[in-house]
């Protein structure tokens, strides 16, 4: 029986983005399989195939390739989680997940980012208990493991919850056990106020962005209150110019919704369409596929730099600003909740804390003091 071809995975930078290089000797069958991977591209300068980091999930890759090639993933490190001293080594990146873990995540159509997080954190869990059957790991041992993580790593409440959920998924969804309860208290979510730009700052970002595609990206994210992933997944057919609506498909929680299409947004999109003529996706990359999350991040940051905005500007700040500006001009909170796709009004209510509308009703006593001094 002939030996399987060998694949070597490595991190690198290519075309101003972080990528995973897929190196192997010429093999027609393997090339055809790699071509099927979402986001895969051939690099003439690197002389190999590659995937943007945002499109890469090691478990999915190994699942697709394992039957026809042997993969060396020893150089691949998780970009989203820092090393911890709970037994995590390079071995964890090639640790095999229990049968059914990845398959059920995919069957339940979890988001790619969630799959990447769960599989990364659960691999660490598997490594930590490598000398023991996972079915025999007790609740007390899991509690100790979680406490060890909390004490040894400066961890946000969100990350702690993700570790817990990754473990619970295995025992509850894969093994079919009853709901698992751990003694480690789930942390209260920090009540941080969202960052917001002024209308003048957003106007400056739009005005100083000359590239029509980049300008359209900024305009539609702000005017529709979109998440970055929602902008990436927009298709031409989602723009309904007759009803002046934009359809958001499969937003957070896999829910569809409609948002208002502003006259100014439609005007910019028409100019962009005339110049770029996209075929399927509203925003496409150089090879005609979907625009990447990293590219949108760069577009927004570069626009803020041109506008000389000193705040930390990122794509989601446009969504925060959309909600806050609507509140300031008197839009009912219920409409904003619907446009943002929030399941609970409590999530939307946080924007009332950053809106300036109520603050302007009151005169600050310092002004009286200063008036008396003049």
Image: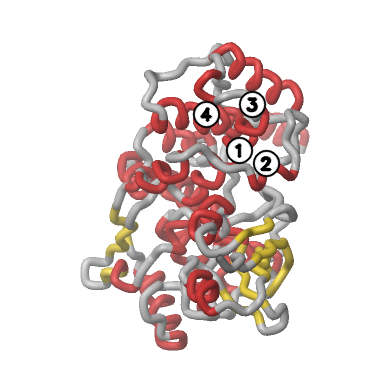
Q: Residues within 10 Å of mark 2 (few under 14, many from 20)?
A: many
Whether pointer 2 and pointer 4 mark residues with C-beta atoms closer than 8 Å, the reply is no
Closest to the observer: 118 or 246?
118
**Gap between marks 4 and 3, in whole Å?**
12 Å
- Is the residue under label 1 in contact with that under label 4 (CB below 8 Å)? no
Residue 64 numbered mark, or none: none
Which percent across, then down, holds residue 145?
65, 21
Residue furthest left in the image: 242
| Vertical arrangement, residue 74 with respect to residue 50, above or below | above
The kind of secondary structure element at disc 3 is: loop
Can residue 204 be seen in the rendering of this structure? no
**Residue occupying the point 40% across, 19% down:** 179
Of labels 2 and 4, the one closer to you: 2
Asked whether disc 1 touches disc 2, contact meaning CB atoms under 8 Å apart, the reply is: yes
Please give the residue where the numbered disc 3 appears in the rendered image: 129
Disc on the earlier residue, 4 or 3: 3
Residue 276 percent coordinates (x, y): 46, 85
| Residue 206 as seen in the image, left or right of residue 93 | left
Q: Horizontal and vertical percent for residue 58?
A: 58, 53
Q: State the residue position of label 4.
A: 167
Residue 119: x %, y % from top left:
55, 42
Which residue carries the number 1 mark? 123
Give the CA separation, mark 2 to mark 3.
12 Å
Per the image, label 4 sits on a secondary structure element best described as helix
């Amino acid at each position: 029986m002939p030996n399987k071809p060998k694949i070597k995975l490595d991190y690198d930078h290519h075309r101003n983005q972080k990528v995973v290089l897929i190196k192997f000797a010429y093999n027609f069958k393997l090339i055809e399989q790699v071509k099927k991977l979402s986001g895969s591209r051939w690099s003439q300068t690197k002389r190999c195939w590659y995937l943007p980091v945002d499109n890469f999930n090691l478990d999915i890759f190994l699942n697709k390739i394992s039957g026809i090639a042997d993969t060396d993933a020893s150089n691949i490190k998780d970009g989203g989680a820092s090393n911890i001293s709970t037994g995590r080594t390079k071995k964890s990146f090639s640790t095999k997940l229990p049968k059914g873990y990845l398959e059920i995540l995919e069957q339940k159509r979890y988001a790619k980012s969630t799959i990447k997080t769960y599989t990364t954190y659960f691999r660490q869990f598997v490594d930590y208990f490598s000398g023991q059957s996972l079915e025999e790991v007790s609740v007390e041992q899991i509690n100790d493991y979680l406490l060890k993580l909390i004490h040894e790593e400066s961890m946000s409440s969100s990350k702690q919850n993700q570790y817990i959920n990754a473990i619970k998924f295995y025992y509850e969804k894969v093994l079919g056990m009853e709901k698992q309860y751990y003694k480690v208290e789930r942390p209260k979510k920090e009540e941080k106020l969202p960052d917001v730009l002024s209308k003048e700052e957003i106007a400056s970002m739009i005005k100083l962005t000359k590239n029509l595609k980049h300008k359209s990206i900024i305009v539609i994210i702000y005017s529709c209150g979109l998440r970055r992933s929602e902008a990436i997944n927009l298709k031409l057919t989602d723009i309904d110019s007759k009803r002046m609506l934009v359809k958001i498909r499969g937003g957070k929680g896999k829910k569809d919704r409609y948002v208002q299409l502003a006259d100014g947004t439609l005007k910019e999109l028409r100019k962009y369409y005339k110049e770029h003529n996209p075929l399927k996706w509203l925003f496409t990359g150089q090879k005609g596929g979907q625009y990447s999350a990293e590219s949108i991040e760069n577009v927004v940051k570069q626009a803020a730099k041109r506008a000389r905005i000193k705040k930390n500007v990122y794509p989601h700040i446009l969504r925060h600003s959309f909600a806050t500006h609507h509140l300031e001009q008197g839009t009912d909170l219920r409409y904003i909740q619907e446009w943002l796709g929030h399941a609970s009004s409590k999530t939307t209510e946080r924007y009332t804390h950053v809106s300036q509308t109520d603050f302007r009703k009151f005169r600050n006593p310092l002004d009286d003091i200063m008036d008396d001094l003049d």
